[in-house]
Structure formats: structure tokens, C-alpha cells
Amino acid sequence: MDNKVRKNKIDWDFWLNMPTVTIGQAVALSLGKDPDKMSQTRTCDGWKYLDDSFKTEEEENKFYKRCRLLINNAFSDKNIRSTECLLVGINQSQDHTAKIHLEYFPEWTISVNWDIPKELKSLVDPENLPTETKQEETESEETELDTVLCPSDFDLVTKKEITTMFDKLVRLGKDQTASDKWKELFKRAHRNGLQELKEEGGFNPCKVGNWLVKKGHYQRELVERKLINNLPSRSRDKKYLIDEYKI
């Protein structure tokens, strides 16, 4: 699967930042195919992908079989009642042109044992890492900030303040702003672990800084500078805790 992804040169930075996709596009991505390189034509039975969009007849059959399964699940009563449903809206044609929320798609594919590219799996929390690597990081990795800053040392801040404070994210998608990325991160807070950092009244900026470093969204040195320069006014007398510690 991974080799197939590399050969097709899918622009994952583009597709993984699409909030919604058609069922056909989602299934194409699940097979490691670039949806933009697949041709469609309108028939009496609706839109159909041309045969030359597929390398083999077997791949074409697998594509439509996956479409059929996804369509039936997306339009099921259980899915419509779900607060985290795949389907964007129920008033759509029940075919591969219907739109779904991409962020919930990879988790669903895993639940039905589909083999999908590692890039698509990265939308699922925890991040797509080998089991032993993820476990090792979870059990033993502790950032230097954790050892120096007590979570109770700083006042809580709002989402808006977090977005302003940490505005130099290093993992932005193509043509994506930091503000856009933060909206995406907060939207997926329950999945990416950000929601666990929220306390009654807001977010502890130090905890968020540690989370950003661990997730690879921020460099540790930059987190330290951001905390020193942007702490809430009542916490500024505590900035020496950061100032005294240098990597």
C-alpha cells in the first residue's frame, strides 16, 4: 500500500486538509489512488468512473465494492443519529457522489478492517506510528518543560489566546494559516488529546506547549520563548521558572 501511495504521488497535504470529500474520493484515497487522476462520465445510471481510472479489473471491482459498503453505512439510520456521523447531509444521492466528513472516515475504515495508506491513518488518534515506537514515547518521553513547570504555575487562557500565543506552527498544510490549523486542532480536540488539557476556565499554556512539542507542531525552544513573552499578566512573576531553564 505504501509503495502504491508513493508511485501515485498523492498530494496528502491537500487531501488531508479537506473537511469533506465525496464517497468516491474517500474510497480512492483508501486504495492509495489520487482522486484528481480518476476520470468520470455521466451515464443513464448516474456518474461512473472510466475503466482507465483503474490499473486492473480487480482494482476496479474492489473500488466499487468499497463504495457500496461505505454508501450503505453512511446512509444507515445508526449513522444519521450519531453525533459524529460520516455523512455530511441526508439529502444527498445515495451513490459515490455523496459527501462525507473526511476526519471520521479513517476510523471507520479501520473498524471494518480496510487496508489504507499510512497517511490516511494519521487522521486517527493516536497518530500512525509503529506500536512499539508509540508505546516507548508514551511511557518514557517527558519533555524538559514537564520537569520544570508545574501545571498549577500559570493562569488559564482561552482558545483565542492559545491561537495568538502559539502562532508559529511548524506543521501547516499547503496554503494553511496558523489560525486555520488551530481551528482544525480544536475541532478534533477529543481525538488528538487536546481536550484532555482543558480545565474549568480554559487551558494551561504550559500544558499546551508541552502537547505541541510532543505532537511535532512546535519546536521546544520556540515554546519556551512564546511562554516567556506571552504569559497572562498574573503569571508573569513566574516566568523565571522558564527563564532559568535552557536546553
Image: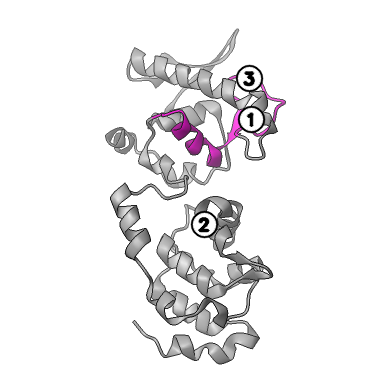
User: What residue is drawn where x is 41% and y is 90%?
Assistant: 244
Q: Dot 1 lies on which element?
A: helix
The spot of residue 218 in percent (x, y) is 44, 67
The spot of residue 225 in percent (x, y) is 47, 81
Tell me the quarter of the image containing the N terminus.
top left
Q: Which residue is mark 2?
A: 193
Q: Which residue is mark 1?
A: 79
> Spatial distance from mark 1 to mark 2, Cα to Cα?
24 Å
Mark 2 or mark 3: which comes first in sequence? 3
Q: Give the total number of marks visible in the rendering.
A: 3
Q: Nearer the viewer, residue 92 or 207?
A: 207
Write down the quadrant of residue 177 in the picture.
bottom right
What is the number of the mark on residue 94?
3
> Spatial distance from mark 1 to mark 3, Cα to Cα?
14 Å
Contact between marks 2 and 3 (CB within 8 A): the answer is no
Amino acid type, mark 2 = Gly
Is residue 123 in sight in this rendering? yes
- Label 1 vs label 3, nearer the camera: 1
User: What residue is drawn where x is 52% and y is 18%?
Assistant: 68
The boundaries of the magenta stretch are 86-114
Amino acid type, mark 1 = Asn
